[in-house]
Image (spheres, rainbow, N blue to C red):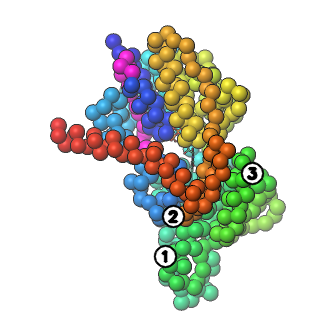
Amino acid sequence: MKKKVVIIGGGYGGIRAAHALSKYNEFEITLMDTRPYHYLQTDVYDFIANKSTITDISVSLVTLFFGGKVNFLQRKITKIVPNENKLITNFNEELSFDYFVLAIGSRTYFPSFIEGLSEHAHGVKSIKRAFEFKQKFEEAIYKKVESEGVCELNPDFNVVIGGGGLSGVEVAAAMAEYSQRFFAMGGYACGGIAVHLIEASESILPGVDQYLVRKSRQRLEELGVNMIVGDKILKVDEHSVHLGSGKSVPMNFMIWTGGVEVRRIESDGFTYNPRGQLKIDEFSRVEGFANIFAIGDCAQVVNTKGKTLAPTAMVAEFGADIAAYNIAATEQKKTLKKIEFDLPGMLVALGGFYTAGVIYGIRLSGIFGFLAKKAVSHIYKWPLTRKCKKSLVKSCNN
Ligand SMILES: Cc1cc2nc3c(=O)[nH]c(=O)nc-3n(C[C@H](O)[C@H](O)[C@H](O)COP(=O)(O)OP(=O)(O)OC[C@H]3O[C@@H](n4cnc5c(N)ncnc54)[C@H](O)[C@@H]3O)c2cc1C
């Protein structure tokens, strides 16, 4: 009889784990996600900058797995009972498993100590949020266009981005470049939209390679982004963002990219770090459980050199390979693989045809970086959409 593997989360990690496990014949694989699509968060900056549509940043999980070895169910997991190897869904179904992979990612964390933040700021970690935000941004651009003849009466539209990490920098650059290009194209005089990027650390992209920090800063300056570093956001109200230094920044729309948290699913016996990530061992297993694995943003991934890896799509995919291998190795009573990988580098999209990157120590910027980023995203997405198209043909023939 085949062993049941249940994967929760159809993101970067979950999909990779499902595909890796489907190479083995001894498993019956089920993947569940609350959403029927995989959201390509890494490409959301293009969506915001009106260069792509919802279908460019999502892949249907229904067709991706249709007729294959993986059974996809649109479900939310509400409870895990690890000691009984079972889980409960939002339909109150009770499902059993032999092996279980948690790949539930993370969501935007709105700290409650920043007064007004959760009421007035938006996140970009869901398509719905990104879509709502894009619509508001376009509405603001339209208002600017409409008031061209009386532009002195129309105050600047201020977009504030809280958090100068990778996603904050990419979103700020995309928005600033888009609004500049948009107004220039139509020959409008009213000027663009003011983009403010606020980071509490002394520099944007804290902890990132200095070359990337320098290039990103230069590019954001060229795009006219107002960078405020070393200042904390204390309070947000309807029209302003108030900082620790006493300054206030005018705000019509705010995006918060200042942190992520892991959605807790009711369960017994799991241990978490202070950021809410599951603690896992060197084989990617949830501490204390030999048949439960956690990968991607929801896990605290530490490699064999003791380095804690930043939550990225790449780490989720590497973790998926380890978890899939170790599930098969456990079943086949082979030696398990340890988490030995490290990140090869980073690419930061900085609006238009400009990306800065460091990959295996090689520095890239401008169009070369842009092409590298596009290639990475194409190499990732193309096999998934190809599979979906094949499934559609299969389903039409049945
Ligand atoms: C703007 C932005 C830019 C980024 N740029 C990059 C980049 O350039 N490079 C990079 O490597 N990383 C980047 N990242 C980070 C990257 O997107 C994440 O690290 C990655 O998505 C993590 O993958 P994951 O599989 O752990 O989770 P996700 O891809 O988030 O997938 C988790 C899935 O779990 C599902 N889920 C959650 N809870 C439940 C539940 N209870 N039941 C069922 N399903 C559930 C969710 O619906 C979701 O589909 C970026 C992130 C953002 C926001």
Quadrant of residue 305 within the rendered picture: top right
Identify residue type, mark 1: Tyr
In this rendering, the answer to whether 128 lies above or below 137 is above
Residue 268: say if magenta. Answer: no
Label 1 environment density (alpha carbons within 10 Å; few <14, some 14–19, many ≥20): few
Give the magenta-colored segment's residue range: 24-39
Chain-order first, disc 2 or disc 3: 2
Q: What residue does disc 2 label? A: 49
Q: Quadrant of the N terminus?
A: top left
The dot on residue 392 is none
Label 2 environment density (alpha carbons within 10 Å; few <14, some 14–19, many ≥20): many
Identify residue type, mark 3: Gln
Is the magenta region chiefly helix, strand or loop?
A: strand
In the image, what residue occupies the spot 60% across and 61% down?
A: 366
Q: What residue does disc 1 label? A: 142
Chain-order first, disc 3 or disc 1: 1
Q: Is residue 156 left or right of residue 265?
A: right
Q: What residue does disc 3 label? A: 210
